[in-house]
Image: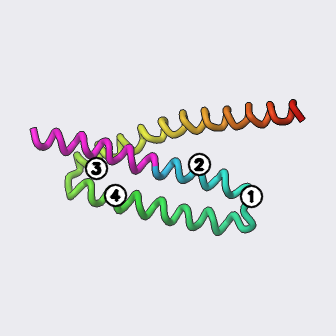
Amino acid sequence: MREILFMIMAFFAGIALGTLFFGGLWFTVKKAVSAKIPAILFFVSLFLRLSITLIGFYYISQGSWQRLLICVFGFVAARFIVIHFTKLIDEKQLQLKKRISHEA
């Protein structure tokens, strides 16, 4: 019973890590468009996102390949969740820009 609880927690931790990773990637791409030196922004973002993700995988797995695998499943699931929500946000921003341009 206790191991099942750890697996569920590993899955949700994977979702949290994936949301941070892929959400951070989306945020970086949005900000890089207006950055003076986007290469530095991409490099720093990549370093931070990878560091946090790998450290998170290390601590969550605690030497158990089963926990690591469940965590990776949560990480991949978060990718689809982030894609879904970022599409919604981008569509709303696009509609808002269209309204503003039509009113002006």
Secondary structure beneath disc 3? helix
Query: How much space separates mark 1 and mark 4, taking CA atoms?
Result: 31 Å
Residue appearing at x 67%, y 56% in the figure: 31
Q: Which residue is mark 4?
A: 56
The disc at residue 34 is 1
Residue 43 magenta? no
The disc at residue 68 is 3
- In front: mark 2 or mark 3? 2
Locate residue 102: give its quadrant. top right
Residue appearing at x 73%, y 55% in the figure: 33
Query: How much space separates mark 2 and mark 4, taking CA atoms?
Result: 20 Å
Query: How much space separates mark 3 and mark 4, taking CA atoms?
Result: 10 Å
Amino acid type, label 4: Gly
Q: How many numbered markers are drawn?
A: 4
Q: Which residue is mark 2?
A: 26
The location of residue 30, given as percent across then percent down, is 66, 51
**Crowding near the residue tagged with mark 1, few <14, some 14–19, many ≥20 C-alpha atoms within 10 Å:** few
